[in-house]
Image (cartoon, rainbow, N blue to C red):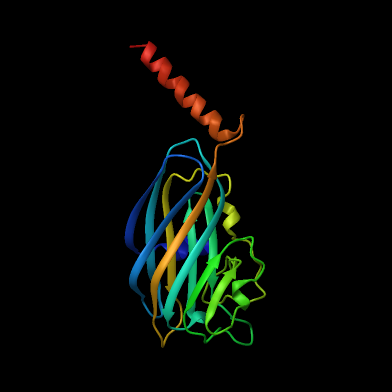
Protein backbone atom coordinates (compact mmCIF):
# COMPACT_ATOMS: atom_id res chain seq x y z
CA UNK A 1 0.00 0.00 0.00
CA UNK A 2 3.04 2.29 -0.18
CA UNK A 3 2.05 4.21 -3.32
CA UNK A 4 -1.53 4.65 -2.14
CA UNK A 5 -0.34 6.15 1.15
CA UNK A 6 1.95 8.61 -0.58
CA UNK A 7 -0.58 9.85 -3.12
CA UNK A 8 -3.71 9.81 -0.95
CA UNK A 9 -2.27 12.57 1.23
CA UNK A 10 -3.00 15.14 -1.49
CA UNK A 11 -6.15 13.77 -3.13
CA UNK A 12 -9.41 15.67 -2.60
CA UNK A 13 -13.12 14.85 -2.46
CA UNK A 14 -15.35 16.36 -5.13
CA UNK A 15 -18.87 15.11 -4.42
CA UNK A 16 -20.81 12.82 -2.10
CA UNK A 17 -23.88 10.67 -2.71
CA UNK A 18 -25.73 8.25 -0.44
CA UNK A 19 -27.17 4.90 -1.50
CA UNK A 20 -29.74 2.84 0.41
CA UNK A 21 -30.43 -0.86 -0.19
CA UNK A 22 -32.64 -3.07 1.95
CA UNK A 23 -32.33 -6.55 0.43
CA UNK A 24 -29.71 -8.77 -1.23
CA UNK A 25 -29.22 -8.16 -4.94
CA UNK A 26 -27.75 -5.17 -6.75
CA UNK A 27 -26.76 -1.84 -5.26
CA UNK A 28 -26.03 0.82 -7.85
CA UNK A 29 -24.95 4.44 -7.54
CA UNK A 30 -24.39 6.85 -10.41
CA UNK A 31 -23.17 10.38 -11.03
CA UNK A 32 -23.70 12.56 -14.10
CA UNK A 33 -22.28 16.02 -14.67
CA UNK A 34 -19.18 17.78 -15.93
CA UNK A 35 -16.18 17.45 -13.62
CA UNK A 36 -12.81 18.59 -14.96
CA UNK A 37 -9.84 16.48 -13.92
CA UNK A 38 -6.98 18.90 -13.03
CA UNK A 39 -4.30 18.60 -15.69
CA UNK A 40 -0.93 17.19 -14.63
CA UNK A 41 -2.01 17.30 -10.99
CA UNK A 42 -1.81 14.30 -8.63
CA UNK A 43 -4.58 15.77 -6.47
CA UNK A 44 -7.07 14.64 -9.13
CA UNK A 45 -10.75 14.40 -8.28
CA UNK A 46 -12.34 11.91 -5.87
CA UNK A 47 -16.03 11.03 -5.87
CA UNK A 48 -17.08 9.80 -2.42
CA UNK A 49 -20.32 7.91 -1.81
CA UNK A 50 -21.81 5.92 1.04
CA UNK A 51 -23.76 2.67 0.98
CA UNK A 52 -26.20 2.03 3.81
CA UNK A 53 -27.69 -1.43 3.35
CA UNK A 54 -29.73 -3.83 5.44
CA UNK A 55 -27.61 -6.71 6.60
CA UNK A 56 -25.82 -8.87 6.98
CA UNK A 57 -24.70 -8.72 3.34
CA UNK A 58 -21.47 -9.52 1.54
CA UNK A 59 -20.22 -8.35 -1.86
CA UNK A 60 -20.21 -10.90 -4.68
CA UNK A 61 -19.05 -8.73 -7.59
CA UNK A 62 -18.42 -5.12 -8.61
CA UNK A 63 -18.62 -3.41 -12.01
CA UNK A 64 -17.73 0.19 -12.86
CA UNK A 65 -18.88 2.27 -15.84
CA UNK A 66 -16.83 5.34 -16.70
CA UNK A 67 -17.47 8.06 -19.29
CA UNK A 68 -14.68 10.61 -19.80
CA UNK A 69 -14.39 13.24 -22.57
CA UNK A 70 -11.31 15.01 -23.93
CA UNK A 71 -7.73 14.88 -22.77
CA UNK A 72 -5.41 11.93 -23.37
CA UNK A 73 -6.22 8.49 -22.03
CA UNK A 74 -2.53 7.81 -21.46
CA UNK A 75 -2.48 10.55 -18.79
CA UNK A 76 -5.15 9.02 -16.57
CA UNK A 77 -5.03 6.97 -13.37
CA UNK A 78 -8.17 5.78 -11.57
CA UNK A 79 -9.00 3.55 -8.63
CA UNK A 80 -11.99 2.37 -6.59
CA UNK A 81 -11.61 1.78 -2.85
CA UNK A 82 -13.79 0.58 0.03
CA UNK A 83 -12.57 -0.87 3.31
CA UNK A 84 -9.71 -3.25 2.56
CA UNK A 85 -10.76 -3.44 -1.10
CA UNK A 86 -8.74 -1.55 -3.72
CA UNK A 87 -8.84 -1.84 -7.51
CA UNK A 88 -6.79 0.10 -10.06
CA UNK A 89 -9.12 0.77 -12.99
CA UNK A 90 -6.76 2.89 -15.11
CA UNK A 91 -3.00 3.32 -14.95
CA UNK A 92 -1.74 5.28 -17.94
CA UNK A 93 -3.34 3.33 -20.81
CA UNK A 94 -0.82 2.32 -23.45
CA UNK A 95 2.27 3.28 -21.46
CA UNK A 96 5.31 1.07 -22.17
CA UNK A 97 9.06 1.34 -21.66
CA UNK A 98 9.32 2.65 -25.22
CA UNK A 99 6.27 4.89 -25.00
CA UNK A 100 5.99 6.22 -21.42
CA UNK A 101 3.45 8.84 -22.50
CA UNK A 102 0.88 6.17 -23.26
CA UNK A 103 -2.22 6.38 -25.44
CA UNK A 104 -3.01 9.56 -27.36
CA UNK A 105 -6.68 8.58 -27.75
CA UNK A 106 -9.07 11.19 -26.37
CA UNK A 107 -11.89 10.09 -24.05
CA UNK A 108 -13.57 6.79 -23.22
CA UNK A 109 -16.95 5.24 -22.46
CA UNK A 110 -16.15 1.87 -20.89
CA UNK A 111 -17.26 -0.73 -18.36
CA UNK A 112 -14.88 -2.57 -16.01
CA UNK A 113 -15.35 -6.08 -14.66
CA UNK A 114 -12.91 -8.83 -13.70
CA UNK A 115 -14.98 -11.10 -15.94
CA UNK A 116 -13.98 -9.24 -19.11
CA UNK A 117 -10.90 -10.56 -20.91
CA UNK A 118 -9.30 -7.47 -22.47
CA UNK A 119 -6.85 -5.52 -20.30
CA UNK A 120 -7.77 -1.81 -20.56
CA UNK A 121 -4.05 -0.97 -20.60
CA UNK A 122 -3.79 -2.35 -24.14
CA UNK A 123 -6.95 -0.65 -25.42
CA UNK A 124 -5.88 1.94 -27.99
CA UNK A 125 -8.93 2.09 -30.28
CA UNK A 126 -10.49 5.45 -31.11
CA UNK A 127 -13.16 5.93 -29.88
CA UNK A 128 -12.43 3.82 -26.80
CA UNK A 129 -15.65 2.02 -25.90
CA UNK A 130 -16.67 -1.39 -24.64
CA UNK A 131 -16.02 -3.82 -21.81
CA UNK A 132 -12.60 -4.27 -20.20
CA UNK A 133 -10.80 -5.85 -17.28
CA UNK A 134 -9.30 -3.28 -14.87
CA UNK A 135 -5.70 -2.24 -15.46
CA UNK A 136 -4.80 -3.74 -12.07
CA UNK A 137 -1.22 -2.36 -12.01
CA UNK A 138 -0.78 -1.23 -8.39
CA UNK A 139 2.26 0.94 -9.10
CA UNK A 140 3.08 4.64 -9.09
CA UNK A 141 1.27 6.20 -12.10
CA UNK A 142 4.26 8.41 -12.86
CA UNK A 143 6.20 5.37 -14.10
CA UNK A 144 3.62 2.64 -14.83
CA UNK A 145 4.26 0.43 -17.88
CA UNK A 146 2.58 -2.55 -19.47
CA UNK A 147 5.03 -5.08 -18.00
CA UNK A 148 4.17 -4.21 -14.38
CA UNK A 149 2.34 -7.03 -12.56
CA UNK A 150 -1.44 -6.83 -12.24
CA UNK A 151 -2.81 -7.44 -8.75
CA UNK A 152 -5.44 -4.79 -7.88
CA UNK A 153 -8.67 -6.17 -9.31
CA UNK A 154 -12.35 -5.62 -8.48
CA UNK A 155 -12.40 -9.06 -6.88
CA UNK A 156 -10.64 -7.51 -3.89
CA UNK A 157 -14.09 -6.34 -2.73
CA UNK A 158 -15.67 -9.80 -2.81
CA UNK A 159 -16.68 -11.03 0.65
CA UNK A 160 -16.60 -7.54 2.19
CA UNK A 161 -19.57 -5.80 3.78
CA UNK A 162 -20.87 -3.27 1.20
CA UNK A 163 -21.86 -0.79 3.92
CA UNK A 164 -19.78 2.30 4.46
CA UNK A 165 -17.76 4.78 2.45
CA UNK A 166 -16.49 4.23 -1.09
CA UNK A 167 -14.19 6.39 -3.21
CA UNK A 168 -13.76 6.59 -6.97
CA UNK A 169 -10.60 8.59 -7.75
CA UNK A 170 -9.45 9.84 -11.16
CA UNK A 171 -6.25 11.81 -11.72
CA UNK A 172 -4.25 13.22 -14.64
CA UNK A 173 -0.50 12.60 -14.38
CA UNK A 174 0.88 14.28 -17.51
CA UNK A 175 0.64 17.81 -18.98
CA UNK A 176 -0.92 19.48 -22.05
CA UNK A 177 -4.57 18.31 -22.33
CA UNK A 178 -7.54 18.24 -19.93
CA UNK A 179 -10.08 15.42 -19.45
CA UNK A 180 -13.63 15.80 -18.11
CA UNK A 181 -15.64 13.17 -16.23
CA UNK A 182 -19.17 13.06 -17.68
CA UNK A 183 -20.62 10.14 -15.75
CA UNK A 184 -19.85 7.03 -13.73
CA UNK A 185 -21.76 4.13 -12.22
CA UNK A 186 -20.60 1.67 -9.55
CA UNK A 187 -22.71 -1.50 -9.34
CA UNK A 188 -22.26 -3.81 -6.36
CA UNK A 189 -23.72 -7.32 -6.30
CA UNK A 190 -24.54 -8.65 -2.81
CA UNK A 191 -25.82 -11.77 -1.11
CA UNK A 192 -26.58 -13.03 2.39
CA UNK A 193 -23.51 -14.64 4.01
CA UNK A 194 -23.44 -18.41 4.31
CA UNK A 195 -24.26 -19.83 7.77
CA UNK A 196 -21.17 -19.87 9.94
CA UNK A 197 -19.47 -17.06 8.00
CA UNK A 198 -17.62 -14.25 9.73
CA UNK A 199 -20.33 -11.72 8.88
CA UNK A 200 -23.08 -13.78 10.50
CA UNK A 201 -20.85 -14.56 13.47
CA UNK A 202 -20.31 -10.85 13.99
CA UNK A 203 -24.03 -10.20 13.86
CA UNK A 204 -24.70 -12.97 16.39
CA UNK A 205 -22.14 -11.51 18.81
CA UNK A 206 -23.72 -8.07 18.46
CA UNK A 207 -27.20 -9.41 19.14
CA UNK A 208 -25.95 -11.41 22.11
CA UNK A 209 -24.30 -8.34 23.58
CA UNK A 210 -27.51 -6.35 23.13
CA UNK A 211 -29.58 -9.03 24.91
CA UNK A 212 -27.13 -9.18 27.84
CA UNK A 213 -27.18 -5.40 28.12
CA UNK A 214 -30.98 -5.33 28.21
CA UNK A 215 -31.13 -8.11 30.83
CA UNK A 216 -28.66 -6.21 33.03
CA UNK A 217 -30.86 -3.13 33.23
Location of residue 166 with respect to 34 vertically, above or below: above
Q: Position of residue 27 (x, y in %)?
A: 46, 50
Residue 110 lies, in percent from the top left, at 52, 71
On-image quarter of the N terminus: bottom right
Q: Quadrant of residue 145?
A: bottom right
- Between 73 and 23, which is closer to the camera in this rendering? 23
Give the residue drawn at x 54%, y 64%.
88
Q: Residue at x 53, y 67 (%)?
A: 111
Residue in the image at 49% along x and 35% along y:
56
Is residue 11 shown to the viewer in this render?
no
- The answer to whether 60 is drawn above or below residue 99 in the figure is above
Residue 67, x across and y down, in percent = 45, 72
In the image, 125: left or right of 80? right
Q: Quadrant of the C terminus?
A: top left
Q: Does 1 appear above or below 137?
A: above
Instruction: Name the residue: 60% across, 75% down.
Output: 121
Residue sitting nearer the eye, 195 or 25? 25
Report the label total. 0
Please indicate, yes or no, whether residue 192 appears anywhere in the rendered image: yes
Q: Residue 200, how many percent across, how many down?
A: 54, 31
Query: Does 138 sit left or right of 76 as displayed?
Result: right
Amino acid sequence: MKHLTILAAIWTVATTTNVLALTPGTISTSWTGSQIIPDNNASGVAFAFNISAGGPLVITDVTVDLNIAGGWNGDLYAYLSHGSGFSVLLNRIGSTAGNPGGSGVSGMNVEFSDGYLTDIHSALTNPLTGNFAPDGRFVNPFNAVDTDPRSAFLGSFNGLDPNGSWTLFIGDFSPISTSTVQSWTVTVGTTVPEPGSAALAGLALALGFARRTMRGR
